[in-house]
Every structure is written in C-alpha cells, then in structure tokens.
Amino acid sequence: MDLTFGKEELAFQQEVRDWLKENLTPEIQGEIKVGRNAYMPKERLVDWQKRLAKKGWLCTGWPKEFGGPGFTTTQKYIFEMEMAKAGAPGTSPFGPKMCAPVIMKYGSAEQKARHLPPMLNSDLIWCQGYSEPGSGSDLASLRTKAVREGDFYIVNGQKTWTTLAQTADWIFCLVRTSNEGKPQEGISFLLIDMKTPGISVEPIITADGNRAGTQEVNSVFLTDVKVPVENLVGEENKGWTYAKY
C-alpha cells in the first residue's frame, strides 16, 4: 500500500502552508499564547473564521451542496495536520459542526436558507443549550419547558455549562414540550436568538479562576422567552433524535 501523497495532494499541502503564512497573523498567534482557543475574544475569533470562510475552508465537513469545499479524506487530513503543526486556533464548533448537520438533515428549506449561510461565512456565533442543573449526564431529565401559545413557544428554564454563551448570537436548545411517555419522547429542538427578551447569561467561575479573557462557561436563564414556532427544527417531541444525529 502506497501511503505517500500524490502530486495533487502535495500541491494542496503547499497551498495550505502558503495560506497559513499569510493569514496566521501575529495578533492571532498572540491570542493563542494567552490561553486556549475558546478564550479568544469574539472579534479575534470572528476575524480568524472569516479568513477561513473567504478561502472556503471554515466548514470543511460540509457537503458541496451547502457550500462546503468537498474535501477528500486525504485533503481533510492534510488540512487538519497543517493547521495543528502551525499552531492555528480552532474554530467554534457549535454552529458549523453541531447545529448545521441537524438543520441540513431535519430543518425546513427556510431554516436552511436563513441559518446555514451565516454559519458558512462566520456572520453569527452559536452556543449549545443542552445541559441543565441536575440534567447533564442524565440529559433526558431536562426541565426547561416550552409551551406553545399561538405562533410562539414560551420558554422557561435554565441551561448550564454553556460554553461561550457570553459571546453567542444564537443558541440551539433542547426543551421539554411534553411530559407524556418516556422522557426522551417529550423533547424538542429549538433555535433561539440570544437577543430575545427574557434571556440572561451569568458566568460560571471554574477552578482556574476568572483571569482576564479566560471566562468560558455560563448559566443561561430563560424567563418567558418568546420563540417563533418556525424556529422549531423538524417535528415537536423529536428533539432527542435530532440531538443524537
């Protein structure tokens, strides 16, 4: 078995290296030395992600149908290895890697048109609203409730350990829409604008303290938050299936 790269793969490897020399700026490298990737200020993170997006390399796992680069397995390996060797920062995974596949698979045409392009271009940052106090490893016991009233869901509850909620523009949430049947059968998948009235974010101070620029996880409180029904992904009470996907 020949495991050496061919001409096209070597050319791609050099393309990645050349791009990194131009785009991995001293400012970005300086931020990496201060702390982990998650600690990068939002402005710097967006700057880095937009550089990748301009090249078409932000959402490397996306199919071409949705604007991805269509990398081969070997190209993806080369890309990841060159990024790691250069010490390049990571990217926020919550939108492009966690939420986007769910929207691609189960979302409506309107949801795909509205939410996928901003992820692809790093116009919006997302966070994940799954864990709750007492509902982490036993996620199916979550209690954040969404009650439908006309064209809206009224959401009340709390999410915890929410990484980068302090900088996120949107959150994808698991919420309880039914108490009938098994706990997993009453959960729905909602997309919520973080600017919606009734949402508040409080930092959680972890064991490494709260040094400037290092705060990462949060509690998110939702009090009578009105979420348009069109922000429900797929069917009501099928969120557990979507989250596993």
Image (cartoon, rainbow, N blue to C red):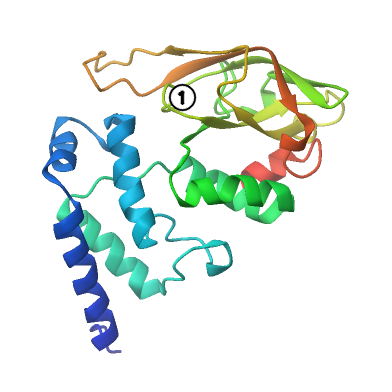
Q: What amino acid type is highlighted by mark number 1?
A: Ala
State the residue in front, 44 or 31: 44
Tell me if residue 107 can be seen.
Answer: no
Percent position of residue 92, x then y: 40, 41
Q: Can residue 192 be seen in this view?
A: yes
Q: Is residue 27 left or right of residue 161?
A: left
The picture quadrant where one finds residue 240 is top right
Q: Which residue is drawn at 18% across and 65% down?
A: 17
Crowd tier of the residue under label 1, counting other residues whose Cα lies within 10 Å: few below 14, some 14–19, many 20 or above:
many
Please say if 223 is above or below 35. Answer: above
Residue 74 position within the rendered picture, expressed as x and y whole percent measured from the top left: 35, 74
Residue at 23 percent of width and 84 percent of height = 4
How many numbered tags mark residues here?
A: 1
SS of the residue under disc 1: loop
Residue 18, located in which quarter of the rendered image? bottom left
Looking at this view, is 144 or 147 the one in front?
147
Q: Mark 1 points at which residue?
A: 165
Give how far across and how far down residue 203 sits, in percent. Answer: 40, 13
The quadrant the N terminus occupies is bottom left
Quadrant assignment, res 29: top left
- Residue at the spot x=15%, y=47% of the render? 25
Q: Tell me the residue at 27%/36% (across/down).
A: 44
